[in-house]
Amino acid sequence: MAESGFPLLSVILWVPLAGAALVLLTRGRSAAAAVAMLAALVSLLAAVAMVAEFDPGVEGYQFLEERDWIAALDISYRLGVDGISVLMVLLTAILTPIVVATSWLSINRRVREYMAAMLLLETGLLGVFMALDLVLFYVFWELVLIPMYLLIGVWGGPNRIYATIKFFIFTFIGSVLMLLAILVIAFDAGSFNVILLPEIGVSSHLQTAVFGAFFLTFAIKAPMFPFHTWLPDAHVEAPTGGSVILAGVLLKMGGYGFLRYVLPLTPEAVDEFRVAVMALSVVAIINGALVAMMQRDLKKLVAYSSVSHMGFVTLGIFSQEQIGIDGAIVQMFSHGLVTGALFLCVGIVYDRTHTRLFADLGGFAKRMPVYALLLGFFSLASLGLPMMSGFVGEFMVLLAAFGWSYVAGVLSLLGVVLAAAYMLWMYKRVVFGELRSAAFARIPDANRVEVMALLPLVALVMWVGISPGTFVNLLDTATAAIATYR
Amino acid sequence: MNGSDFAFLLPEIVLVATAITVWAVDFFTPRDRKPDLAWPAAAGALVAMAFLAISWGEHREMFLGTLRLDNFSLFFRFLFLTVAFFVIVGSPGYVRRKLRNAGEFYGLILMSTVGAMGIVSSREFLTAYISLELVAFGFYVLVSHARHEARSNEAGAKYLILGAFSSGLLLFGISLIFGATGSTGYAAIAAALETTPDFGMVWTLGVALVLAGLGFKVAAFPFHSWAPDVYEGAPLPITAFLSVGSKAAGFAFLIRLFAEGLFPVLDDWRVAIGVVAVLTMTFGNLVAIQQANLKRLLAYSSIAQAGYILVGVATLNADTTSGMLLHIAGYTATNLGAFLVVIYFHNLTGKEGIDDLRGLYRRSFLLTLVLAVSLLSLAGMPLFAGFMTKFYLFTAAAASQLWWLIALAVANSILSVYYYLLVLRQAFITPESEEEEQRPAFRLPSHARATLSLLMVLVLWIGIYPSVFVDAAEAGSRALFGG
Amino acid sequence: MIEAIPLDHVVLVATTLFGIGLYGVLSRRNAVAILMAIELMLNAVNINFIAFSMYVSPDPTVGQIIAVFVITVAAAEVALGLAIVLQIFRNKSNINVDDLDLLRW
């Protein structure tokens, strides 16, 4: 475990927070956006440096930072990353500046506060992926909720109160359970140290309880069927930027939690409930796809497609095969890029037409050719076209699924087919056909900022699709270790 | 006892002297200057704080063992002085608007503080009881101090009747314990319990009555019914004082009593206290959700907070005592912050409804910020004092393996987030009507800005890097449990 | 010397007195009557202390000292209570606690 002298992780983590404080001091929307952009870019730069410095061959965590925090309870400020966290940190750091850029266009009230909330959210998310102390992890986990609640509540759609309450209740349950699990672990193992905990382990008689609590928390967050019902509502009401982060990164906290805490700490309980969890994952894939197909609202369709795609993630993770876990992580990364981009595309249309209903949309191919091209690209990426990122993760997960059971494999494959159906149908309804309203005859194409925001995502989606090895290599050591906890 | 013992009581002596001086000066002060007597009174509290430093690390028994000055009492004495200081400093604006006899008001706050400081040092029932009455008498007058407001009178009457009633229960309990063990000193009671573990009915009834009496003082379910009405009717600064000072004093009484006197029989009472704790917090939270008045909401939330602290009493040991002290300290800073916001808001608008907070965000960033920090801390959100202190407390309580208790406490504390967020929603999110948008921004006096900022920093300090406070709390707990 | 009254009897009287006071507090609706009932409770306490002090305590003066304190406190309490009740009477011309509509025990 390399102890690095320069606190690189702290820089990545705290620069956004400092940026949030600075943003609150600015006057005017452009100044706020500029400062926010600067902070997000510095954080991204540091994150890229981290990826470059990261040594995939080394076992365990890298860039470790450790400081006493609350000595009385043996709680430390301990940060570190392995291959899994590296990808998640990178994803967060990439999406935030993109969201800042596009929000600069679409948010028109309380811009300062919006940018500050976004940066605070970034710090929370980064912290979740870097923390190597259970209490620190919980702190960041909760820290994510406040800005998310504000983003939906202040800048959300007409039905935002309902959505925030629902969001709150689900996260409330998750937080209770997680805190209880942490207390049980503290009592049982006597440590909050995430590096040491897998070795100490949780006593057999407590494993089911800890597993249950953690599982529900992460399942709500991921979200797994049948705990996903908060997600569509939150998405529909959230502003575009909020949706992008919500789908792009927030959901990954669930998958990350499974990998970092559930599999290593409660292997016996996982063994016991594995079949049920995988069955639920398959149900999520099919159910999410079918429900997505029935949606009349563009944003809801993308939201339900997330449920379906995240089903692959849990399926891969609980296959407990290295290839499945690798696939799950790549799927998380890819889903973050693709769904984030899709929500941006939804936002572009919504900003111009103020509707998301398919009944009102159609015929944008002629009016907005660039936009149609981009939406087409990300739709194909989402349905898992080979050479694009969506394919890689789902393919690896499918391999693992077939290895476990043919039924699961075939059913999951059906999910991929359904994805193709609903995505293409969606594309047809939005882009082709006739314009539904004369008012749309003059809408402008995607502008320069929007295109610039989406292009990096195009590049990354292609990169993951064409050369997945670059990313899987980062993961290998970490996932190999996780696959052994069984 | 010898003359030098009095040096250790200098803080109390300074307070009494300040109170009398303030009362005396009050006679010669013109009416419109009277609210400014807050500054000498607050200065007295600060001087007393400085004198406290003498007792640092000293463990000293005085007056035939009726008083014991140790780190435990030092912790609470410091806490009470802090509370008195902030309550007094936060009052002048309110006093100017509502109250006539300012000198009397400040002096009584100091006297009640002296009483509270006595409670935490006493290790004998009679001394503790007299100190308790000193606190209560001050409060009876303070609560009904807005003489011409019916609400304040009613609150005073109710507080007095229930206070006297609970004193009756407490005293009868003490008399039964005295009958069973032949002593009122905690140490002697513990010694008697060592030789005779079971005194039968008389003893059980005695302890139950003492617990009921103290239950009233800390507003534990089912003895809480006075709290919301009294909190609502009392002058705002006194509500703040009641919700932190008087509550902390009650808990200090309970903790020392159980740690030094009743510890041998604690196991018989753990489950009962745990049930009371759960009922208290659940009731407080559920009713708080329905409140439309900010003051009442804080009243019910402080009932819920008492429930969390009772978890520590139910699982009493050295660690949970540190947890309770820490939580009481964090809660004190937090609740003072919340109440000061309400006080200043009330001074500026004359209102205290949750709906009235609409647009607060635009009108005063500082008030909104301190309100947000305080409420999120009460809700137990990480980064704020409330999370850290509760986490410490519940982690320590986990050793008792009363999992149902801890699970319900955690669930409750997260449930409470809901209604705190409702308040914050008004302040941050709900848009103002056009008419309301014309209202001017608030102008806070600079001392108000300073106190609010100070409390906010304190809440964040305890929440983010609590080592200093943890050390202090553990020192306090060691004074009772040794080690 | 007169034969001592057995402790049981004294405690019985004290407990009965306490019970009467308790009942009075809970059932009376006149604030002054409630204060009087509280006095009964405190007097029961005094009887208890003096009796126990005589029979149980190693130092027979302890209970008597406590009783003196309790009497003093009780007197002060009633003085304060009456002052507040008087204030209410001035504002409302009524000292029925039900009319204070906040006393819902």
Image: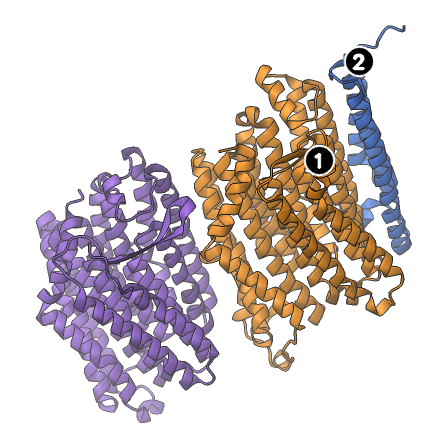
Chain colours: A purple, B orange, C blue
Judge whether B278 appears above or below A293 on screen.
above
Towards the viewer: B416 or B61: B61
Towards the viewer: A230 or B413: B413
Q: Chain of mark 1?
A: B
* Residue A136 horizontal side relative to residue B21, left or right: left
Residue A411 in sight in this render: no
User: Which residue type does callout 1 highlight?
Assistant: Ala
Q: Which residue is mark 2?
A: C9
Element at badge 1? Answer: helix
Element at badge 2? Answer: helix
Disc marking residue B128: 1
In the rendered image, the residue lying farthest to the bottom is A442
- Tag 2 near tag 1, CB within 8 Å: no
Residue B159: x %, y % from top left: 76, 46
User: Which residue type does callout 2 highlight?
Assistant: His
Q: Which class describes the residues within 10 Å of circle 1: few (<14), some (14-19), or many (20+)?
A: many
Residue A467: x %, y % from top left: 9, 69
Q: Chain of mark 2?
A: C
Q: Are the residues flagged by discs 2 and 1 from a single subunit?
A: no
What residue is shown at x 34% (from left), y 79% (from top)? A37
Residue A349: x %, y % from top left: 31, 82
